[in-house]
Image (cartoon, rainbow, N blue to C red):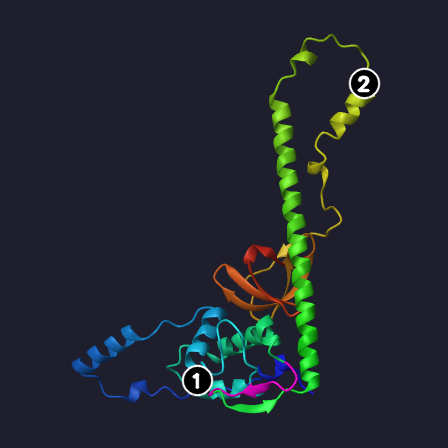
Amino acid sequence: MTTPNTEVAEKASATVEPDTSNNMAPASSNETVTDSVAATAAPNKPASVKEVIAYLASEYPDCFSSAGAAKPLKIGIFQDLAAAITEQSPISKTQLRQALRVYTSSWRYLESIKPDAIRVDLTGNEVEKIDQQQADHAAQTLAESKAKAAELRKQRAKAAQADKANKEGRKAGQKATNTPNKKVMNKKPSGRSNPQELKSKVNQNPAAAVQSKDQAPLAPVSETALKVGSSVLVRLGQAPMSATVVEVARNEVTVQLQSGMVIKTSRDSLFQQA
């Protein structure tokens, strides 16, 4: 039995028509002006997964949605969408596959996969019911994803607290260094050190002494390795986590964790084994 996430994101082959532009007669001035106006009026192509999903929701409102409750998708919905893509379409099959993967991994979509819920096609027609096995798989994936998200929030909170403690410790140490101790300067040396004073000086900045020495160094992900489908390590909190690249857009990268949760992070948060 196939799972709800992999069923809707099946692959389809693309057919490319030959370029016959060189065999056409030169365009007239009126045709040139018309083509220029049409090119100017053409909509901008979606640049991110979020924009692709918004495009699908606008084109197929009875099937997709950008927010709120989602509808279970027909098995093989990718082939139906791919067949509608032409050279003039604002999205490619690669963008479509990435968007479907993110869409069917979202919490609101997984929550729609329930026993006897009806899958729909692009026009919103009901096509088939969801069986118990598919519903159980979606419920398990949703629970694991939410648990992973809670753990990530916990790790981020700890990392923020540790960073704040380190900054306060450095600030306190710098202040102590820049402030002269008049009492010590005017006091004659006794030749002996007070054990309590030594202990206090050693523990003066405990936060700055906290270092993650047990973590092995990681190398930043190279440009050649940073592509859709590649495996990377993303640093969220103290320990890096394995993830798969879903989308690369400028300085931001969308990755999918092993739990199925999809997050967006910066390039400098991604690493690979040195």
Q: Earlier in the sequence, mark 1 or mark 2?
A: 1
Q: Quadrant of the C terminus?
A: bottom right
Residue 259: x %, y % from top left? 67, 68
Magenta stretch holds residue 113: no
Residue 147: x %, y % from top left? 69, 64
Q: What segment carries the magenta color? A: 114-123
| SS at mark 1 in the image | loop
**Can residue 163 be seen in the rendering of this structure?**
yes
> Which is the main secondary structure of the residues drawn in magenta?
loop
Left or right, residue 58 beside residue 166: left
Which residue is drawn at the image coordinates 40% and 80% (left, top)? 89
Which residue is drawn at the image coordinates 64% and 24% (left, top)? 176
**Can residue 258 be seen in the rendering of this structure?**
no
Q: Which residue is mark 1?
A: 85
In the image, residue 122 sits, relative to residue 51, either above or below, namely: below
Q: Residue furthest bottom?
A: 127
Q: Residues within 10 Å of mark 1 (few under 14, many from 20)?
A: some
Q: Which residue type carries mark 1?
A: Ile
Q: Which residue type carries mark 2?
A: Asn
Q: Residues within 10 Å of mark 2 (few under 14, many from 20)?
A: few
Q: Quadrant of the N terminus?
A: bottom right
| SS at mark 2 in the image | loop
Q: Which residue is mark 2?
A: 194
In the image, residue 9 sits, relative to residue 188, either above or below, namely: below
Q: Residue furthest left?
A: 29
